[in-house]
Image: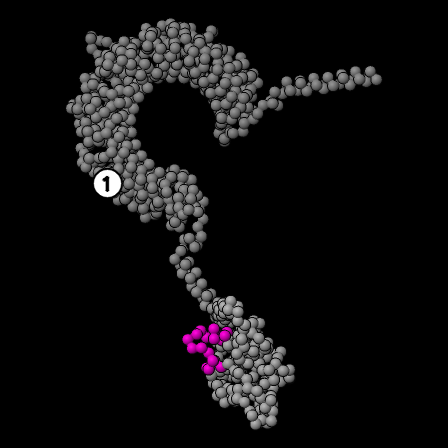
């Protein structure tokens, strides 16, 4: 038993060891995968939340792993990617890279390790990357580049970026092996030690971008040494994150001038070697010591491009402007210029900046278009003018612009109307984000027009813009447009009109879904940006997804047809109801309800007065006016007059009859009279004949009598007297109870023989007295 236990324990241990070994030999079993690769074998795995390098096809040429949470790159993560040319690990938490992690990336040309947690750089990482051309190591917390020189084996390197928030020192041996670069970027805002000549051996050297904030503030010698090493006549230098305090802050720039300017017999032999002067996001302290830039006079004669962006500059004095004799491009955007200081900067428009072609003064504190027009009118070569993001509220009626002006940007202002002040020479006009409601101005040369963010309700007239090719009119109050609107434009090619308040009529939906496709004008902002604002049930629905019914699209014909059909159906229904006597039933129901209400009211009155219902008549007689002679000559004398001489006088007691001609109260409603007569009568006698059935008045009386009598409200029974042969089929079908009564009850017939008349009267009297007799 003990041997069996030992054997079982040994087998279990072997099984666990095999599992651990299989997991160690197959690390991919725990790695996540990324399958976001396109047909060009470019895999975008950014923003995937990965904490380790995911598995990707080994045929990938580009792998983007930026903006994840990767902290470690192991020796196996990239082993199979021998064809990879571009790898980005930007913005992760990368702190550890295995020494042989990149050994298999023989074909890698671009590597981005910026914005991570690398505290040291290792030459071993790059020793097998012989094809590498672009390397970005910016914004990592390493203090030194390390030893041995990390880039010594990168013979093909052409773009290099290094440095970050912790870089303190650069030594001459740090850049061994780097001989020429197209672009160099150094972030050394806290750089405190620099050995002169560290960057001097890199030549030829293309664009250089330097961030040396601390050096310009506290160690101008260091800044001067760096600038001296990278300054060549054809090398553009961009200085970022500058904080300038007084004139001494610009002294390091003289080093750049010394290297870029050649001397020969006391003459400037290369006056235009400094092509561009670019300052952005600068902070000028003690601004009263830094007002004219005259300390930079040794630089200002040469550049053709000057940019001072977001520097809180409120004026560039006229003497400084006069130094810019070769200037063609001037960007003073996002500063504090006003009309008065701009007038000083442009020397009030008198004889300065004659070669200026591009002027950008957007994002300042300007308010008067007329003043700006006056100041730039003398710039005879000006082609581009950007005066956007200022506070203009009106436009003068007329203006005088340079005849060369082709591009004008007045966007993000407060303009409400447009006047002929705009030059007719314009080819590009940007009026977006104003308060414009229309644009009715003839601009024959205009090719591009930008009107987004206004309150325009319709497209501008095409005949006013004969050469327009691009129109952007998004986010306005445009309701709709159609083929006729676009046909007025002779050369329009691209239209962006989405994000408006479209009324999704049938014409507009049909035009946008089919007519515009395949035409000369293309909607370049995408179909999904065209969304319905009305009608309400289509609100927020993309126009391309709208399906309107025939009723929506052909409302007038549809309503006409519907009305015609409804009228036809109504006529058929009216005829059907008439044939079924529905109207009669409704009329009788209403009359009966009203009469019944009156009866209850009278009964309540009698009850309150303590009176009992009195029967005043033996019978209520309903007959046709054409049969009145028989009633008056035979029925009334026979039943109401006494017969004293008759041997059967005891059976001939006179009866009291109720006749409408005699006993109805004049001025009362006919139904109330009928109700009252029936209420006060023991029996109801119907004198039936062809005249009775065909008489309108008699039929109305019979209708209501029938309705009331057979509802069980009258005392006794009905007595039917046929003056002439009459079958139940001769009775109108709407008198269903009367027809049923004729089928189930024996009725009296007026005899044609003289000898049977006496028997007829005897039977009638007995029926009126309630005596049982077959008749």
Q: Main secondary structure of the magenta part?
A: helix
Residue 512 in sight: no
Residue wearing tag 1? 441
In this rendering, position of residue 618 left or right of residue 287: right
In this rendering, position of residue 531 left or right of residue 79: left
Q: Is residue 186 above or below residue 63?
A: above
Q: Residue 661's spot in the image, x, y percent?
A: 46, 82
The image quadrant of residue 746 is bottom right
Q: Is residue 742 above or below residue 36?
A: below
Q: Is residue 669 magenta?
A: yes
Which residue reaches farthest right? Answer: 1
The image quadrant of residue 475 is top left
Q: Residue 167's spot in the image, x, y percent?
A: 42, 10
- Report the magenta residues as a range: 659-676
Mark 1, other Cα within 10 Å: few <14 / some 14–19 / many ≥20: some
Q: Is residue 354 magenta?
A: no
């Amino acid at each position: 038993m003990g041997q069996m236990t030992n054997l079982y324990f040994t087998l279990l241990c072997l099984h666990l060891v095999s599992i651990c070994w299989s997991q160690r030999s197959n690390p991919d079993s725990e790695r996540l995968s990324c399958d976001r690769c396109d047909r060009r074998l470019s895999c975008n795995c950014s923003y995937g939340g990965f904490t380790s390098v995911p598995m990707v096809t080994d045929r990938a040429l580009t792998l983007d792993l930026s903006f994840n949470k990767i902290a470690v790159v192991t020796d196996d993560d990239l082993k199979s990617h021998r064809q990879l040319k571009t790898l980005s690990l930007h913005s992760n938490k990368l702190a550890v890279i295995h020494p042989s992690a990149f050994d298999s990336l023989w074909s890698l040309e671009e590597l981005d390790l910026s914005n991570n947690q690398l505290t040291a750089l290792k030459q071993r990482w790059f020793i097998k990357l012989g094809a590498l051309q672009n390397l970005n190591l910016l914004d990592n917390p390493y203090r030194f580049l390390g030893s041995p020189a990390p880039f010594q084996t990168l013979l093909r390197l052409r773009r290099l970026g290094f440095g970050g928030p912790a870089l303190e020192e650069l030594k001459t041996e740090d850049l061994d092996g780097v001989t020429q670069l197209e672009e160099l970027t150094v972030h050394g805002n806290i750089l405190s030690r620099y050995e002169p000549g560290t960057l001097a051996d890199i030549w030829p050297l293309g664009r250089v971008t330097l961030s040396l904030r601390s050096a310009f503030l506290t160690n101008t010698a260091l800044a001067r040494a760096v600038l001296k090493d990278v300054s060549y006549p054809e090398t553009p230098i961009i200085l970022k994150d500058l904080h300038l305090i007084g004139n001494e802050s610009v002294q390091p720039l003289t080093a750049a001038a010394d290297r870029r300017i050649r001397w020969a017999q006391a003459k400037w032999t290369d006056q235009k070697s400094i092509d561009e002067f670019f300052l952005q996001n600068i902070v000028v302290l003690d601004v009263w010591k830094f007002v004219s830039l005259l300390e930079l006079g040794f630089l200002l004669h040469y550049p053709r491009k000057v940019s001072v962006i977001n520097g809180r500059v409120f004026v560039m004095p006229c003497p400084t402007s006069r130094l810019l004799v070769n200037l063609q491009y001037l960007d003073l955007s996002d500063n504090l210029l006003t009309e008065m200081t701009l007038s000083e900067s442009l020397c009030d428009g008198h004889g300065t900046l004659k070669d200026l072609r591009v002027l950008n003064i957007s994002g300042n504190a300007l308010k008067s278009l007329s003043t700006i027009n006056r100041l730039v009118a003398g710039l005879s070569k000006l082609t581009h003018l950007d005066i956007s993001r200022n506070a203009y509220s009106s436009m003068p009626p007329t203006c005088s612009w340079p005849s060369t002006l082709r591009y004008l940007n007045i966007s993000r202002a407060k303009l409400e109307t447009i006047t002929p002040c705009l030059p007719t020479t314009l080819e590009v006009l940007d009026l977006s984000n104003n308060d414009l409601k229309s644009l009715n101005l003839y601009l024959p040369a205009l090719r591009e027009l930008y009107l987004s963010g206004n309150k325009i309700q319709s497209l501008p007239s095409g005949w006013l813009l004969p050469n327009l090719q691009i129109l952007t009119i998004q986010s306005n109050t445009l309701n709709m447009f159609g083929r006729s609107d676009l046909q007025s434009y002779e050369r329009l090619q691209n239209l962006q009109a989405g994000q408006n308040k479209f009324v999704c009529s049938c014409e507009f939906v049909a035009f946008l879904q089919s007519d515009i496709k395949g035409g000369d004008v293309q909607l370049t902002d995408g179909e999904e940006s065209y969304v319905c604002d009305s009608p309400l049930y289509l609100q927020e629905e993309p126009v391309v997804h709208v399906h309107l019914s025939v009723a929506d699209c052909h409302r007038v014909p549809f309503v006409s047809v519907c009305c015609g059909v409804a009228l036809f159906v109504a006529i058929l229904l009216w005829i059907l109801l008439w044939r079924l006597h529905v109207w009669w039933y409704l009329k009788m129901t209403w009359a009966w309800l009203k009469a019944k209400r009156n009866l209850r009211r009278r009964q309540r009155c009698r009850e309150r007065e303590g009176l009992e219902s009195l029967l005043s008549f033996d019978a209520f007689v309903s007959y046709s006016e054409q049969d009145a002679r028989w009633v008056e000559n035979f029925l009334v004398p026979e039943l109401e007059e006494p017969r004293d001489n008759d041997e059967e006088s005891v059976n001939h007691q006179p009866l009291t009859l109720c006749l409408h001609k005699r006993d109805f109260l004049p001025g009362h409603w006919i139904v109330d009279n009928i109700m009252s007569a029936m209420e006060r009568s023991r029996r109801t006698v119907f004198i039936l004949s062809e005249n009775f059935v065909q008489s309108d008045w008699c039929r109305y009386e019979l209708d209501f009598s029938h309705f009331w009598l057979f509802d069980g409200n009258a005392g006794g029974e009905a007595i039917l007297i046929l003056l002439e042969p009459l079958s139940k089929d001769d009775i109108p079908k709407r008198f269903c109870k009367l027809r049923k009564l004729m089928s189930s009850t024996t009725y009296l017939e007026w005899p044609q023989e003289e000898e049977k008349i006496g028997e007829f009267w005897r039977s009638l009297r007995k029926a009126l007295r309630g005596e049982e007799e077959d008749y």
